[in-house]
Image (tube, rainbow, N blue to C red):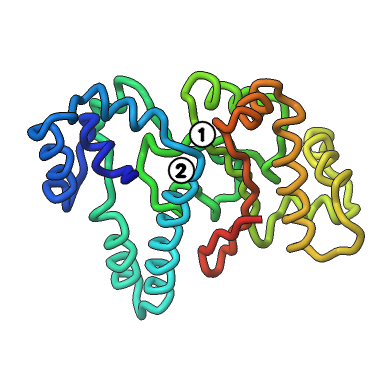
């Protein structure tokens, strides 16, 4: 299933390349079997595998653009190379966004300013349901937010996204005194850390623990996973390359 034509068929507008992408959907409508309601249904029932594939394809595009930007010799050239990533991407009509949302995946990510899921997966507004906190922890409000995403928005995929040089996990590995609120945030991270002080392994262990905790802490998520409607995966983003690796 190709996400772009379906979004267009659902009355969502794209910049750059829009005519080429819209053509298949228009042809389907003219040939029969292209009822907008049918296309809407296909969009609603995309599988976890579809959603994961779209994210991986988006990350592949971002990694290429990030490498090109890194090789640029001046800021203007760097921005020009990054702009190419977005000029042909689907951007949803603001009027459609005002009417509602239809994200195809949810991401529980760290709040680190360098790790923007929309950036890493080359997604536009309205495509990702994002929940973020330091250390991508499964706090109560995060679980409730994902319940909403899966239960009401019928999102088929949840990605728990950790990253290189995570400050929250680094703090959990240390022993300095922090504020009571930060200590509360770090407590579950500390509880699940492996032996040793390797930050990368600690971040990845935290991601795996959080991904497992989600279905244990939510009957709704557990039921969706059991029914095959939902997949929960862990992932690790390398800030330097932009590459997101599944764990």
Q: Residue furthest front?
A: 32
Place of residue 192 in the rendered image (x, y in percent of width and height, measured from the top left)? 85, 46
Relative to 149, does residue 242 appear above or below in the rendering?
below
Relative to 75, does residue 218 appear above or below in the rendering?
above
SS label for mark 1: loop
Q: Are marks 1 and 2 in contact (CB under 8 Å)?
A: yes
> Quick check: can you spot residue 110?
no
Place of residue 55 in the rendered image (x, y in percent of width and height, measured from the top left)? 46, 50
Return the mark for residue 51: 2
Which residue does the image show at 74% across and 39% down from the upper left? 212
Which residue does the image show at 77% across and 61% down from the upper left? 201
Place of residue 146 in the rendered image (x, y in percent of width and height, measured from the top left)? 59, 28
Neighbours of disc 1 within 10 Å: few (<14), some (14-19), many (20+): many
Front-most of residues 115 and 226: 226
Which residue does the image show at 73% across and 56% down from the upper left? 204
Q: How many marks?
A: 2
Q: Is residue 231 left or right of residue 36?
A: right
Residue 195 occupies quadrant: bottom right
Q: Residue furthest left?
A: 30
Neighbours of disc 2 within 10 Å: few (<14), some (14-19), many (20+): many
Residue located beneath label 1 in the image: 156
């Amino acid at each position: 299933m190709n996400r772009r034509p379906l979004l267009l068929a659902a009355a969502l507008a794209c910049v750059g390349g829009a005519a080429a992408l819209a053509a298949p959907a228009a042809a389907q409508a003219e040939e029969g079997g292209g009822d907008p309601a049918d296309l809407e249904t296909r969009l609603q029932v995309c599988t976890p595998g579809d959603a994961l594939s779209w994210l991986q394809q988006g990350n592949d595009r971002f990694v290429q653009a990030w490498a090109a930007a890194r090789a640029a010799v001046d800021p203007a050239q760097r921005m020009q190379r990054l702009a190419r990533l977005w000029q042909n991407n689907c951007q949803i009509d603001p009027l459609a966004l005002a009417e509602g949302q239809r994200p195809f995946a949810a991401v529980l990510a760290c709040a680190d300013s360098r790790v923007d899921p929309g950036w890493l997966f080359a997604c536009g507004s309205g495509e990702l349901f994002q929940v973020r906190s330091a250390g991508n922890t499964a706090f109560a409000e995060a679980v409730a937010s994902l319940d909403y995403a899966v239960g009401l928005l019928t999102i088929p995929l949840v990605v728990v996204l950790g990253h290189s040089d995570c400050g929250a996990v680094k703090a959990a590995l240390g022993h300095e005194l922090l504020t009571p609120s930060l200590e509360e945030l770090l407590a579950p991270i500390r509880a699940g850390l492996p032996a040793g002080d390797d930050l990368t392994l600690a971040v990845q262990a935290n991601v795996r623990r959080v991904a497992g905790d989600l279905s244990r802490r939510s009957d709704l998520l557990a039921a969706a996973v059991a029914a095959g409607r939902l997949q929960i995966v862990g992932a690790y983003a390398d800030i330097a390359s932009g590459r997101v690796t599944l764990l």
